[in-house]
Amino acid sequence: MQLPNLEEMSAEEKQWFANSIAGMVVADGHADQSEMVFLREAINFLDDKDKIEKLMAIIKDGKAPELSPLDIDPKQAFLMLKYLAQLMVADADLSPKEIGYFLLAGRLLSFNNEILTKLWKSARALLERDLPQAIVETGSLKARVSLTKVDETGVTFRLGKALMPKVKIMLYVLKSVHSERPLKGDEKHWDPLSCIMEKQHQVKFDEGHYVIRARIEQRLFEDHGIMQILNPEDFAVVSDGGFFDTEKDSLLGSFLKCYVCDNKKIKFYVLHSKSMITDLNIFGIPSFVRSAGELKFCDFNLIQVVSCSKCGFSSHDKEHFKRMETSEPTFSVEEFSKGWEEKIEPLLKKAQEIGEPFYGEDRDTQQAILSYDLAIATFEQMVSIASNDEKKGAALRKKASMLMVQAEMLMESQNRDAAEENLKKVVDALEPVFESLKGVEIMRTCVLLFQIKIYVNDLQSAAQYMKFLDNYDPDKKLKEGTEEYKELKVSSAKLKATFDDRAIFTKEAMTHFHLDEEE
Ligand SMILES: [Zn+2]
């Protein structure tokens, strides 16, 4: 964001500008931690550090500092105002309170309503340009709108006209902006979706405009484009390499590039969201049971690990492959390559002997088990080159997750010893770094280790993990609504459920990693 020329501003003008920035940050009535951090940086131009602290103290309770009229060079004033307009939409949301504050600041700088309105509306247009777009059709009206809110029950948008209550609205979500799926044919939009007008209210400061909530009136399918907006990560990966057709319609394929050896034709698959019924095993690993709808069944555990046919680099994480020319690896390719060829050779040879089936969508269980060996070797290599505890912990957690899925497959293919050996490897990998993990990750790891300890009858260690989670937030300091807070609730509940049923979760009591009571 372009700042006014601060060097030409007097101390008084700088203070006014800092106050107005602070006021805008708290205009929607709250100032969370990240906003406070942003603000401290934004007002860093105040020469007197005491003034920064004083201002931070005022807005801590969500109160805006007082502003009085300021007589300042019009060009500087205009740049200040422009900065405030950008700041107003920086959180991807524009509330009437923020607009109200903007109008107040603008009037104190002696701007007239016409200019102010123009400015906040162009800030809004900038904001809306990045939102999902749709065409709405109702009666004789047809208009392009930005969807400000989308969920599985409906959408919200702004319209220059009020609608009749309960009137029918056809919604065509446009493909170009926010769909990551390859475009089929010339269609610029997804299939029409039938909605009705649920409620509306007039937009404050913007006469004649209404915010309209449309409720979806028919069953939502993937071809409506709503799911693509809600879970874009579940749809095909955008890449420079383009898309390829898959045999199963439940899969989306993209060509990605190998960071290690530059191979350009790595086939990466993504499963359509919510297309399969899964059954979680006692460690939370899904097994794929059947199709949830009309899309063809795919056991995604078989093909989620993607392997480079040239150098053997293997991962289930799209971020480990190069998607765009501008993408950069999250690990050092040079370090990774040291000794990699020798390490992977025996496994890579096996994969290359299988050939095409191993690199496509038709892997069998044995081939899939091999793909996990390759991924485990890849993550071990990443562990060995990790430059800090955080990267090491992340790589070990990925290795552990590969071992857990492989264990599920080994168990289901009657190789119980190998499956249980994997559990031991997971413990060996995660226990030494447990203390260095943080937040959500340490809680999830804690639950997994607890479950494994219960399974192998190591109650003494299990008790340690239980104690750890019990003491995670003894003073109830975690803020409600944060990821960490939610995870603590979920993890505690999982741990308790395992503890309550500890007698049936042991290896003596189980024939595989699933509970069979409902079959
Ligand atoms: Zn490669």
Image (cartoon, helix red, strand yellow):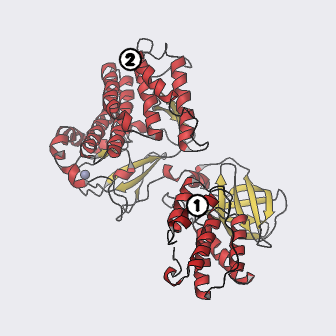
| Residue bearing mark 2 | 456
**Comparing labels 2 and 1, the label whose residue is closer to the camera:** 1
Residue at the image position 36 percent from the left and 28 percent from the top: 407
* SS under mark 1: helix
* SS under mark 2: loop
Q: Position of residue 498 (x, y in %)?
A: 51, 21
Q: Is 170 rendered above or below residue 76?
A: above
Q: Is mark 1 within 8 Å of ligand 1?
A: no
Mark 2, Cα crowd under 10 Å, few <14 / some 14-19 / many 20+, is: some
Q: Is 63 rendered above or below residue 140?
A: above
Q: Is residue 461 left or right of residue 38?
A: left
The kind of residue on which mark 1 rests is: Met
Foreground residue among 431 and 182: 431
Foreground residue among 5 and 514: 5
Q: Is residue 389 left or right of residue 24?
A: left
Foreground residue among 201 and 146: 201
- Distance of mark 2 from mark 1, alpha carbons? 53 Å
| Residue bearing mark 1 | 56
Q: Is residue 17 left or right of residue 413?
A: right
Mark 1, Cα crowd under 10 Å, few <14 / some 14-19 / many 20+, is: some
